[in-house]
Amino acid sequence: MHFLRFTADNEEKLRTQIALEEDSVSSARAAGNETQWLLSSIELGNLLTSARRERDACDVLSDVADLARVAPPEELGWWLLYLGTAKQYLNERPAARQLFNEALEIAQLHKFSALESYVLHHMGRCAVEEGEIELARSLFGRALVLREALGDPRQASSRRALEMLNETRWGPPD
Protein backbone atom coordinates (compact mmCIF):
# COMPACT_ATOMS: atom_id res chain seq x y z
CA MET A 1 0.00 0.00 0.00
CA HIS A 2 1.25 3.46 -0.88
CA PHE A 3 -0.30 6.35 1.00
CA LEU A 4 -1.46 9.25 -1.19
CA ARG A 5 0.93 8.44 -3.98
CA PHE A 6 1.21 11.17 -6.60
CA THR A 7 -0.52 10.43 -9.89
CA ALA A 8 0.13 12.59 -12.93
CA ASP A 9 -2.93 14.36 -14.31
CA ASN A 10 -1.75 14.00 -17.89
CA GLU A 11 0.05 10.77 -18.82
CA GLU A 12 0.89 11.98 -22.33
CA LYS A 13 2.53 15.11 -20.95
CA LEU A 14 4.48 12.99 -18.46
CA ARG A 15 5.73 10.70 -21.26
CA THR A 16 6.80 13.76 -23.26
CA GLN A 17 8.64 15.22 -20.25
CA ILE A 18 10.41 11.91 -19.69
CA ALA A 19 11.52 11.73 -23.34
CA LEU A 20 12.84 15.30 -23.22
CA GLU A 21 14.70 14.67 -19.99
CA GLU A 22 16.15 11.39 -21.33
CA ASP A 23 17.50 13.38 -24.29
CA SER A 24 18.94 15.96 -21.92
CA VAL A 25 20.66 13.27 -19.85
CA SER A 26 22.13 11.65 -22.97
CA SER A 27 23.30 14.96 -24.43
CA ALA A 28 24.87 16.17 -21.20
CA ARG A 29 26.59 12.84 -20.61
CA ALA A 30 27.95 12.72 -24.18
CA ALA A 31 29.20 16.31 -23.89
CA GLY A 32 30.86 15.60 -20.55
CA ASN A 33 28.74 18.28 -18.88
CA GLU A 34 28.59 16.71 -15.42
CA THR A 35 26.50 19.48 -13.87
CA GLN A 36 23.77 19.20 -16.49
CA TRP A 37 23.99 15.41 -16.47
CA LEU A 38 23.36 15.41 -12.72
CA LEU A 39 20.53 17.96 -12.84
CA SER A 40 18.79 16.21 -15.74
CA SER A 41 19.20 12.83 -14.07
CA ILE A 42 17.67 14.15 -10.85
CA GLU A 43 14.66 15.44 -12.76
CA LEU A 44 14.42 12.27 -14.86
CA GLY A 45 14.49 10.12 -11.71
CA ASN A 46 11.60 12.13 -10.29
CA LEU A 47 9.59 11.84 -13.51
CA LEU A 48 10.22 8.11 -13.84
CA THR A 49 8.99 7.54 -10.30
CA SER A 50 5.86 9.55 -11.12
CA ALA A 51 5.37 7.23 -14.11
CA ARG A 52 5.58 4.16 -11.82
CA ARG A 53 9.00 3.27 -13.25
CA GLU A 54 10.83 3.18 -9.91
CA ARG A 55 13.47 0.64 -10.95
CA ASP A 56 14.40 2.83 -13.93
CA ALA A 57 14.51 5.84 -11.61
CA CYS A 58 16.89 4.03 -9.26
CA ASP A 59 19.13 3.11 -12.21
CA VAL A 60 19.24 6.68 -13.54
CA LEU A 61 19.89 8.15 -10.10
CA SER A 62 22.48 5.52 -9.21
CA ASP A 63 24.39 6.34 -12.41
CA VAL A 64 25.09 9.81 -11.04
CA ALA A 65 25.71 8.87 -7.41
CA ASP A 66 29.35 9.93 -7.51
CA LEU A 67 28.40 13.29 -9.03
CA ALA A 68 25.62 13.82 -6.50
CA ARG A 69 27.90 13.16 -3.56
CA VAL A 70 30.21 16.04 -4.57
CA ALA A 71 27.44 18.38 -5.80
CA PRO A 72 26.27 21.48 -3.97
CA PRO A 73 24.15 20.53 -0.94
CA GLU A 74 20.76 21.41 -2.40
CA GLU A 75 21.28 19.22 -5.48
CA LEU A 76 22.48 16.40 -3.24
CA GLY A 77 19.37 16.83 -1.11
CA TRP A 78 17.00 16.53 -4.08
CA TRP A 79 18.95 13.52 -5.39
CA LEU A 80 18.61 11.83 -1.99
CA LEU A 81 14.88 12.62 -1.84
CA TYR A 82 14.11 11.24 -5.29
CA LEU A 83 16.24 8.13 -4.83
CA GLY A 84 14.58 7.58 -1.46
CA THR A 85 11.14 7.98 -3.01
CA ALA A 86 11.89 5.43 -5.73
CA LYS A 87 13.15 2.98 -3.11
CA GLN A 88 10.09 3.62 -0.94
CA TYR A 89 7.81 2.63 -3.81
CA LEU A 90 9.93 -0.46 -4.43
CA ASN A 91 9.16 -1.33 -0.79
CA GLU A 92 12.80 -0.82 0.18
CA ARG A 93 11.72 1.34 3.09
CA PRO A 94 14.79 1.03 5.36
CA ALA A 95 16.97 2.31 2.51
CA ALA A 96 14.40 5.01 1.74
CA ARG A 97 14.35 6.17 5.36
CA GLN A 98 18.13 6.41 5.44
CA LEU A 99 18.12 8.54 2.28
CA PHE A 100 15.27 10.71 3.58
CA ASN A 101 17.08 11.27 6.88
CA GLU A 102 20.22 12.36 5.07
CA ALA A 103 18.23 14.71 2.84
CA LEU A 104 16.44 16.16 5.87
CA GLU A 105 19.72 16.80 7.64
CA ILE A 106 21.04 18.69 4.59
CA ALA A 107 17.82 20.69 4.19
CA GLN A 108 17.79 21.71 7.85
CA LEU A 109 21.50 22.50 8.00
CA HIS A 110 21.34 24.76 4.95
CA LYS A 111 17.83 26.09 5.61
CA PHE A 112 16.41 24.77 2.32
CA SER A 113 12.79 25.09 3.43
CA ALA A 114 11.19 23.84 0.21
CA LEU A 115 13.38 20.74 0.18
CA GLU A 116 12.72 20.20 3.87
CA SER A 117 8.96 20.34 3.33
CA TYR A 118 9.15 17.74 0.55
CA VAL A 119 11.35 15.44 2.60
CA LEU A 120 9.08 15.68 5.65
CA HIS A 121 6.02 14.96 3.51
CA HIS A 122 7.65 11.92 1.89
CA MET A 123 8.86 10.71 5.27
CA GLY A 124 5.27 11.00 6.47
CA ARG A 125 4.03 8.83 3.61
CA CYS A 126 6.67 6.25 4.37
CA ALA A 127 5.76 6.30 8.06
CA VAL A 128 2.09 5.65 7.24
CA GLU A 129 3.09 2.74 5.04
CA GLU A 130 5.03 1.29 7.96
CA GLY A 131 2.13 1.78 10.37
CA GLU A 132 3.81 4.60 12.32
CA ILE A 133 0.78 6.86 12.35
CA GLU A 134 1.77 9.25 15.16
CA LEU A 135 5.16 9.80 13.55
CA ALA A 136 3.41 10.38 10.22
CA ARG A 137 1.11 13.00 11.78
CA SER A 138 4.11 14.82 13.19
CA LEU A 139 5.97 14.76 9.88
CA PHE A 140 2.96 15.92 7.85
CA GLY A 141 2.31 18.65 10.41
CA ARG A 142 5.87 19.92 10.14
CA ALA A 143 5.67 19.82 6.33
CA LEU A 144 2.41 21.76 6.43
CA VAL A 145 3.87 24.52 8.62
CA LEU A 146 6.76 24.99 6.18
CA ARG A 147 4.52 24.88 3.13
CA GLU A 148 2.16 27.46 4.62
CA ALA A 149 5.10 29.74 5.42
CA LEU A 150 6.37 29.37 1.85
CA GLY A 151 2.93 29.87 0.32
CA ASP A 152 3.46 26.52 -1.41
CA PRO A 153 0.29 25.19 -3.05
CA ARG A 154 1.38 21.70 -2.00
CA GLN A 155 0.24 22.61 1.51
CA ALA A 156 -3.11 21.16 0.39
CA SER A 157 -1.44 17.75 0.00
CA SER A 158 -0.01 17.86 3.52
CA ARG A 159 -3.35 19.06 4.89
CA ARG A 160 -5.16 16.24 3.07
CA ALA A 161 -2.73 13.67 4.47
CA LEU A 162 -3.47 14.85 8.00
CA GLU A 163 -7.20 14.80 7.32
CA MET A 164 -7.03 11.26 5.98
CA LEU A 165 -5.13 10.07 9.03
CA ASN A 166 -7.81 11.60 11.24
CA GLU A 167 -10.76 10.31 9.17
CA THR A 168 -9.67 6.73 8.79
CA ARG A 169 -8.10 4.18 11.06
CA TRP A 170 -4.71 3.54 9.56
CA GLY A 171 -2.78 0.66 10.97
CA PRO A 172 0.32 -1.39 10.27
CA PRO A 173 0.57 -2.78 6.75
CA ASP A 174 -0.77 -6.27 6.12
Image (cartoon, helix red, strand yellow):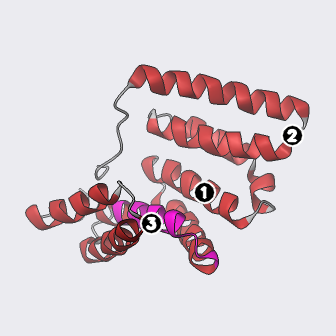
Rate crowding at label 3 as few (under 14), some (14 to 19) or many (20 or more) other CA atoms within 10 Å.
many
Q: CA distance from mark 1 to mark 3?
A: 12 Å
Q: Residue at x 65, y 40 (%)?
A: 59
Relative image position of residue 80 (x, y in whole percent): 61, 59
Q: Is residue 59 left or right of residue 114?
A: right
> Crowdedness of circle 1 by 10 Å Cα count: few (<14), some, many (20+)?
many
Q: CA distance from mark 2 to mark 3?
A: 30 Å
Image x and y of residue 98, in percent: 56, 68
Q: Which comes sooner in the sequence, label 2 or label 3?
A: 2
| Placement of 103 over or under 15, stated as above or below | below
In magenta segment, residue 112: yes
Residue with the mark numbered 3: 117
Q: Main secondary structure of the magenta part?
A: helix
- Tell me the kind of residue under disc 3: Ser
Q: Earlier in the sequence, mark 1 or mark 3?
A: 1
Report the magenta residues as a range.
Answer: 110-125
